[in-house]
Amino acid sequence: MAGATGIASGSGALMGVSFEIKADAKEGVSPLSLQASLKDQDGKVLPSAVVAGSVTVSVGLLGDVNNDRLVDSGDAILVLRYAVRLITFTDAQKDLGDVNGDRSTDSGDAVLILRRAVKLIERFPREGAPKLAEGHGDLVPGAAFGEMKVFPQKGVEAQVMLDAGTYGADLTITYDASAYRTARVRPAEGVLLVSNADNPGEVHLSVARTEAAEPLALWIELEGAGQELSLRLTGNVFGGDGGPAGAVERLLDRPLTSSLSAAYPNPFNPSTTVRYALAQDGETRLTVYNLSGQVVRRLVSGRQQIGRYAVVWDGRDEAGRGVASGIYIARLDAGAVRQAQKMLLLK
Ligand SMILES: [Ca+2]
Ligand SMILES: [Ca+2]
């Protein structure tokens, strides 16, 4: 190689060297050594510099992780299966699967492999393809919990919504394994979806699609019965260029049965806090009665939403007068649920 004529002293990169790997090259690590012969400004030969290193040769077609000489949705599926940890990849497969060259083999790459399989793109970013246009304006990829269906004593179905503009996602949903187990992740139309629920308390799901003009609803079915449902959604979402477009972290926490908790403090003076949970939106009444069944105080009366509530009773009646020491009953009426708790006022 020739090169550095005319450059005086100093340090820096003089040139780049590219190697073409022969078609019959052996897969694996090949040693590489560079020898530079250097001359000073008078043309005197200096001791030569030798740099030893190596290159890793991956033989195969970029994106063709199953090595069948085709880049198709079969490869995208394998990348998704790898992303949810259902299978392992060799180093060569990891490398061939990383079609956008970000050193991670994930749903972002599956998106690109799918797009190539349906001829939406001709080359991968690692092959020098120009950066892909998003095609959906300002849509920001994202994922969140959506609707929920509760089947008492049987289980729940929770919806994970991928926003429009989300072409791929690697997501983990964690839940209380003592109350629930994953029944399944429902297949969705028009997308590649792979899930792994081998570990109790968590389900991994990876998804890739070629079109993302619309949001996508995915349903996770959990079997079991609990007083409440607490789900955590974490992971990454990918845009149409296959690059990571954001990290996701969402919590869903809701009661599954309406209930009234014991008042605290109890006995009390001058006030106590009554807590209750609503599993459904609807007319809700929380009323304080005396032992004769007469209404002492209406603490809550009206429509309320699913959630957890705390109401303070200050020991006064509807007219604002302090009531006498004794036992009182707090009663919750919410839908079909009617529950009561005793409270003792001690003056
Ligand atoms: Ca293939
Ligand atoms: Ca990648």
Image: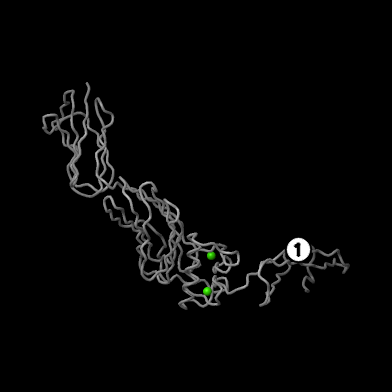
Percent across and percent down for residue 287 are 17, 37
Picture layout, residue 63 above or below residue 11: below
10 Å neighbourhood of mark 1: few (<14), some, or many (≥20)? few
Residue occupying image coordinates x 48% and y 76%: 117
Task: Between residue 204 and residue 125, name the one nearer to us.
Answer: 204
Q: Is residue 139 left or right of residue 104?
A: left
Q: Is residue 230 left or right of residue 124?
A: left
Picture layout, residue 326 above or below residue 207: above
Residue occupying image coordinates x 17% and y 45%: 302
- Residue type highlighted by circle 1: Ala
Task: Between residue 319 and residue 166, name the one nearer to us.
Answer: 166
- Numbered disc total: 1
Q: Quadrant of residue 301?
A: top left
Percent across and percent down for residue 233 are 41, 54
Picture layout, residue 231 above or below residue 62: above
Q: Is residue 36 left or right of residue 93?
A: right
Residue occupying image coordinates x 78% and y 68%: 7
Picture layout, residue 325 above or below residue 88: above
Task: Between residue 221 and residue 14, name the one nearer to us.
Answer: 221
Which residue lies most toward the top here?
A: 347
Label 1 secondary element: strand
Percent across and percent down for residue 1 are 78, 74
Q: Which residue is mark 1?
A: 52
Q: Quadrant of residue 69?
A: bottom right
Colouring scheme, one of rainbow, by chain, secondary structure, one colour: one colour
Percent across and percent down for residue 266 are 26, 28
Instruction: State which quarter of the image contains the C terminus.
Output: top left
Q: Quadrant of residue 260?
A: top left
Asked if the beta carbon under badge 1 is closer than 8 A to the nearest atom of ligand 2, the reply is no
